[in-house]
C-alpha cells in the first residue's frame, strides 16, 4: 500500500476540535462531516485536498477528544496519510481501527515543506520527498497492529 | 520486576502473572461506555460488522449527555438511535433525559464503576474513574463496538509517571488547581501514552471529588490513564454504592516509573489555563486584568457536589457582575436535586446566574452557552482549544469552580480568597 500527493503542513498539538468541530457532531454521516474537516484551522483544506495528499504535522497530532469522527473525516475527504512527530494516543488508536494510514517520523515532519510532492510506502515506512529528493524512514508498526491494518480495521480483524 | 498499579490491573484482566511497559495485551473489560455522540458511530460499526449481540448487557453503559435534552433534530435522531440500540440489546445501564447525568459524574455516583475495574469508554474523559483505583481509558467508537461485542480490548501496557503528593491544599484551592498545575508543568503531551500514578501522604487529604477531577484531566496531559491508590476515602465512597465488589490493587514497592514528580499540595495556588492549550497555566492573581463575558461552572470535570458548594459559598448573597452571563450546570440529576434541597439553586438565581439541567452542552461548543466572536469565558471545563466553546475567535480560560465563581462577581479573572470559601 502507498500514497502519493501534495503536502499540507500543520503545527504541534492539532486538536480534534479543529479537525472536526463539535458543533457538527449532531450527525455520524462521514460525507456530511467531512465537509468541515480542518475548518477551524484551515478553512480551505477541504477545497484544496486531492485524493492521496498527505498531512504533515508536529507533536501530539489529534489531541483532545476521543471522537473517531476526526480520523474519519481526514480519511473521507481523500487524505492519503498523516505523518506527524507524534500522535495523541486515542487518535493513534482510532486511525488504526478505521484504516487511516498514519506514520510517526519527526525527521520527515521537520524536513518536508508545505506544497512538496511526497510518496509514502506504508509497508516499508519509507517516505520520499519527490520535490527535494530526500527520503525518510518512519517507525514500522508492531506486528499486532500491522495485522489490524492489513485486515482493514479492528472489526474486520476480529471477524477473521 | 515490580509492576505499577495500572500494570497490575491490566495483567489481571489479561490473565497474565505479570506485564511490562510496551507489551501488547488483550484484556477483559468490566464496563464499556458510550454517549450520544460516540455511540451512534459504534452502533453503525457494530451492525456493519454483523455482530449478533452484546457480550453482557449489564457491562455496557450508554449515557445521553452531550446534546440532551436534544438541541436539534439531528441530535434527536442520534439519541433515538442510542435508545433503540439500548432497548434492542436490553442494556441495563442506559441513561436518558430525567435519569441521566454527565457520564463521568454519573457512573461513579451510581456505583457502576469500582476499584480494580478495567474500563473503556468512547469519550476521552473516561480516565476519570482512575480516582476509584480502576484502570479506565478513553477510546473511539470502533473500540466501543468491538468491546460491546467481545468484552475485550487490546492495549499497549503503559509506562508510568509517579506523582508524589505531599502537604495539604490551601482552602481556596481544589483538585482542579492541582491538575492544571501539573499540566502546566509537564505539558499537553507530557504523559503521552503513559499512566499518571498518584501516590504519597498528600493523597489522603484529597476528597473523592478532587481525585475525580484530577484523573478526569489526565488526558489533557496526553496520558492513557490517571490512577489513585485505594484508601479510606475510596472505601467510604464506594461503600453501599458499587454494584460489584471492589478489588484493591496497589503498586509493587519496586515498580518502575519513568519519572517521579514531587508535588507539594500546600504550595498550590488558584491556577488558570489561558487560551488555547491547557498547558498555558498562570496563577489566577496574574490575570486580574482579563475581563470575561461568560462564566461556566459544570462539566464532567467540575459539576459535582463539592463544585456546586464552592460556587454557592462565593455567590450566595452576592450579585454576578453586570455584563457577565453565569451558567451553572450540576452534572447529574442527583446533584441537581441536592442543589435544590440545599437552597443552592435559589441562591444562584438570586445572584443572577442561570441553572441548567445536566448536559455537556457548552464545554464542547454544543449549545447552552456558545460564545460569539471576540468573547471570553472562564470555565470549569477541561479544554480551551481554538473554537472549543464557539467562534474561532472566542477564548476559554480554564479554572476551578471557586475561581470561576469569584470571577463572575467581579467580571474579571479573580482568585478566590481563603476567607470566602
Image (tube, rainbow, N blue to C red):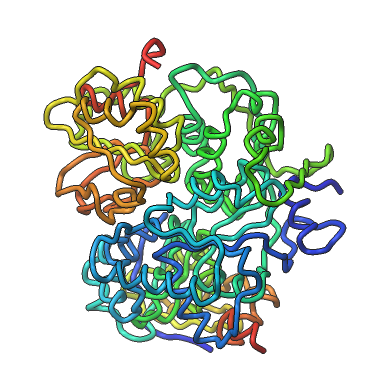
As displayed, is residue B100 above or below residue B199?
A: below
Q: Residue at x 40, y 79 (%)?
A: A75
* Whole-percent x, y for residue B322 in the image: 12, 27
Q: Residue at x 47, y 52 (%)?
A: B103
| Residue B282 visible within the image | no
Q: Residue at x 34, y 21 (%)?
A: B415
Q: Is residue B44 left or right of residue A8?
A: right
Q: Residue furthest top?
A: B419
Q: State which quadrant residue A111 falls in.
A: bottom left
As displayed, is residue A26 above or below residue B385?
A: below
* Whole-percent x, y for residue A8 in the image: 33, 71
* Whole-percent x, y for residue A137 in the image: 58, 73
Report the front residue among A81 and A106. A81
Report the front residue among A60 and B334. B334
Q: Residue at x 59, y 72 (%)?
A: B148
Q: State which quadrant residue A158 falls in.
A: bottom right
* Whole-percent x, y for residue B250 in the image: 78, 41
Q: Quadrant of the C terminus of chain B?
A: top left
Q: Is residue B404 left or right of residue A110?
A: left
Q: Is residue B213 left or right of residue B417?
A: right
Q: State which quadrant residue B410 falls in.
A: top left
| Residue B124 visible within the image | yes
Q: How many marks?
A: 0
Amino acid at each position: 500500500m502507498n500514497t502519493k500527493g501534495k503536502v499540507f503542513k500543520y503545527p504541534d498539538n492539532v486538536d480534534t476540535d479543529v479537525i472536526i468541530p463539535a458543533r457538527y457532531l449532531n450527525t455520524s454521516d462521514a460525507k456530511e462531516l467531512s465537509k468541515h474537516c480542518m475548518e477551524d484551522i484551515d478553512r480551505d483544506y477541504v477545497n484544496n485536498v486531492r485524493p492521496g495528499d498527505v498531512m504533515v504535522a508536529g507533536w501530539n497530532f489529534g489531541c483532545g477528544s476521543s471522537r473517531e469522527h476526526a480520523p474519519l473525516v481526514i480519511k473521507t475527504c481523500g487524505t492519503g496519510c498523516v505523518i506527524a512527530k507524534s500522535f495523541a494516543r486515542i487518535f493513534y488508536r482510532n486511525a488504526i481501527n478505521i484504516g487511516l494510514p498514519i506514520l510517526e517520523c519527526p525527521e520527515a515532519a521537520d524536513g518536508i515543506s508545505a506544497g512538496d510532492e511526497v510518496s509514502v510506502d506504508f509497508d516499508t515506512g519509507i517516505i520520499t520527498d519527490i520535490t527535494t529528493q530526500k527520503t525518510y524512514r518512519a517507525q514500522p508498526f508492531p506486528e499486532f497492529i500491522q495485522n489490524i491494518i492489513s485486515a482493514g480495521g479492528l472489526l474486520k480483524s476480529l471477524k477473521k | 520486576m515490580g509492576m505499577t498499579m495500572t500494570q497490575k490491573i491490566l495483567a489481571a484482566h489479561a490473565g497474565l502473572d505479570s506485564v511490562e511497559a510496551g507489551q501488547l495485551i488483550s484484556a477483559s473489560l468490566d464496563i464499556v461506555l458510550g454517549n450520544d455522540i460516540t455511540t451512534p458511530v459504534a452502533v453503525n460499526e457494530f451492525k456493519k460488522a454483523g455482530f449478533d449481540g452484546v457480550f453482557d448487557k449489564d457491562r455496557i453503559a450508554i449515557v445521553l449527555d452531550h446534546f440532551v435534552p436534544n438541541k436539534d433534530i439531528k441530535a434527536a435522531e442520534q439519541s433515538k438511535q442510542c435508545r433503540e440500540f439500548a432497548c434492542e440489546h436490553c442494556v441495563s445501564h442506559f441513561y436518558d433525559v430525567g435519569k441521566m447525568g454527565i457520564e463521568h459524574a454519573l457512573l461513579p455516583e451510581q456505583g457502576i464503576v469500582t476499584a480494580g475495574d478495567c474500563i473503556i469508554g468512547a469519550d476521552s474523559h473516561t480516565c476519570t474513574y482512575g480516582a476509584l483505583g480502576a484502570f479506565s481509558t478513553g477510546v473511539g467508537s470502533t473500540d466501543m463496538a468491538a468491546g460491546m461485542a467481545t468484552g475485550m480490548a487490546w492495549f499497549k501496557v503503559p509506562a508510568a509517571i509517579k506523582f508524589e503528593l505531599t502537604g495539604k491544599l490551601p482552602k481556596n484551592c481544589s483538585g482542579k488547581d492541582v491538575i492544571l498545575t501539573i499540566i502546566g508543568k509537564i505539558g499537553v503531551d507530557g504523559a503521552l501514552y503513559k499512566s499518571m500514578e498518584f501516590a504519597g501522604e498528600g493523597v489522603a487529604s484529597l476528597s473523592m471529588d478532587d481525585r475525580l477531577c484530577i484523573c478526569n484531566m489526565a488526558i489533557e496531559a496526553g496520558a492513557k490513564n490517571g490512577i489513585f491508590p485505594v484508601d479510606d476515602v475510596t472505601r467510604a465512597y464506594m461503600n453501599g454504592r458499587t454494584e460489584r465488589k471492589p478489588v484493591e490493587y496497589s503498586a509493587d514497592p519496586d515498580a518502575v516509573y519513568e519519572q517521579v514528580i514531587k508535588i507539594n499540595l500546600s504550595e498550590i495556588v488558584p491556577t488558570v489555563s489561558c487560551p488555547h492549550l491547557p498547558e498555558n497555566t498562570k496563577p489566577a492573581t496574574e490575570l486580574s486584568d482579563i475581563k470575561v463575558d461568560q462564566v461556566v461552572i459544570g462539566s464532567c470535570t467540575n459539576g459535582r457536589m463539592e463544585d456546586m458548594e464552592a460556587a454557592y459559598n462565593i455567590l450566595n448573597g452576592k450579585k454576578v457582575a453586570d455584563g457577565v452571563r453565569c451558567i451553572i450546570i450540576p452534572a447529574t440529576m442527583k446533584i441537581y436535586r441536592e442543589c435544590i434541597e440545599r437552597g443552592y439553586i435559589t441562591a444562584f438565581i438570586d445572584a443572577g446566574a442561570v441553572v441548567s439541567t445536566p448536559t455537556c452542552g457548552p464545554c464542547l461548543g454544543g449549545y447552552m452557552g456558545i460564545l460569539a466572536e471576540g468573547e471570553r469565558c472562564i470555565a470549569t471545563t477541561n479544554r480551551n482549544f481554538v473554537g472549543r466553546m464557539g467562534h474561532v475567535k472566542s477564548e476559554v480560560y480554564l479554572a476551578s469552580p471557586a475561581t470561576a465563581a469569584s470571577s463572575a462577581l467581579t467580571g474579571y479573572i479573580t482568585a478566590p480568597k481563603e476567607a470566602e470559601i
